[in-house]
Image: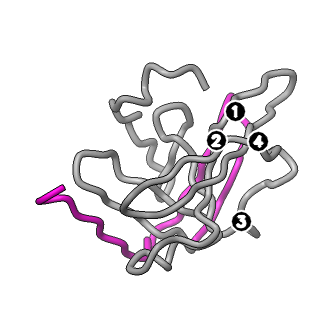
């Protein structure tokens, strides 16, 4: 795990997350997480997320660098997108800034920063059907 790092910083620009033309989140208070070997992630405050579109799942994962994550399905119209969003309720020391924030897979959503569409990143999660 040598050389692995995480950097967190507040995002001063406006961030929007959408799926199939439906806005899932819109905020001026995102936290950016940059982790070695992974795409940049936007973590968003729950009040800025349309939580009524999210349904908790039983999925949990553990990251040695962030802690235990819980997941949500996202429902847009009749389509359910499994485990498309996640949160670290109690992240490990050093990344407390993402506690209770929601993150969406940018590989499967439309991300706009200050109105500019961002390219969907390529990662191991790109091929997983959400």
Q: Which of marks 1 and 4 precedes in the sequence?
A: 1
Q: Residue 48, labelled with which disc?
A: 3
Q: Nearer the viewer, residue 98 or 51?
A: 98
Per the image, label 1 sits on a secondary structure element best described as loop
Residue identifier under label 4: 57
Tell me the quarter of the picture where residue 76 sits.
top right
Tell me the SS state at disc 3. Answer: helix
Residue placed under numbered mark 2 in the picture: 18
The quadrant the C terminus occupies is top right
On screen, residue 77 versus residue 86, left or right, reads: right
Location of residue 19 with respect to 39 vertically, above or below: above
User: Left or right: 80 with respect to 121?
Assistant: right
* Mark in front: 2 vs 4: 4
Report the span colored magenta: 1-28
Q: Position of residue 13 (x, y in %)?
A: 46, 68
- In what quadrant of the picture does the N terminus appear? bottom left
Instruction: Using residue 126 as the reference point, say whether residue 89 is left or right of it.
Output: right
Spatial distance from mark 3 to mark 4, Cα to Cα? 20 Å
Give the residue at mark 1.
21
Q: CA separation, marks 2 and 4?
A: 20 Å
**Which of the 4 quarters of the picture holds residue 72?**
top right
**Labels 2 and 4: the sequence-earlier one:** 2
Residue in view at x 43 percent, y 75 percent: 95
The answer to whether the residues at label 1 and label 2 have Cβ atoms under 8 Å apart is yes
How does the figure colour the protein chain or chains?
A: one colour
Q: Distance from label 4 to label 1 (Cα)? A: 23 Å
Which residue shows up at 23% across the image and 53% down it?
A: 36
Q: Are marks 3 and 1 in contact (CB under 8 Å)?
A: no
Is mark 3 in CB contact (under 8 Å) with mark 4? no
Secondary structure under tag 4 reads strand
List the single residue furthest toward the left. Answer: 3
């Amino acid at each position: 795990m040598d050389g692995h790092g995480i950097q967190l910083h507040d995002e001063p620009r406006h961030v929007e997350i959408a799926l199939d033309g439906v806005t899932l989140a819109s905020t001026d208070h995102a936290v950016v997480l940059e982790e070695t070997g992974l795409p940049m992630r936007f973590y968003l405050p729950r009040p800025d997320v349309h939580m009524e579109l999210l349904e908790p799942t039983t999925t949990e994962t553990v990251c040695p660098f962030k802690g235990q994550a819980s997941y949500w399905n996202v429902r847009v119209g009749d389509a359910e997108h499994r485990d498309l969003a996640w949160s670290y309720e109690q992240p490990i020391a050093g990344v407390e800034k993402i506690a209770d924030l929601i993150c969406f897979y940018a590989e499967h959503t439309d991300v706009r920063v200050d109105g500019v569409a961002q390219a969907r990143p390529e990662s191991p999660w790109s091929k997983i059907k959400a």
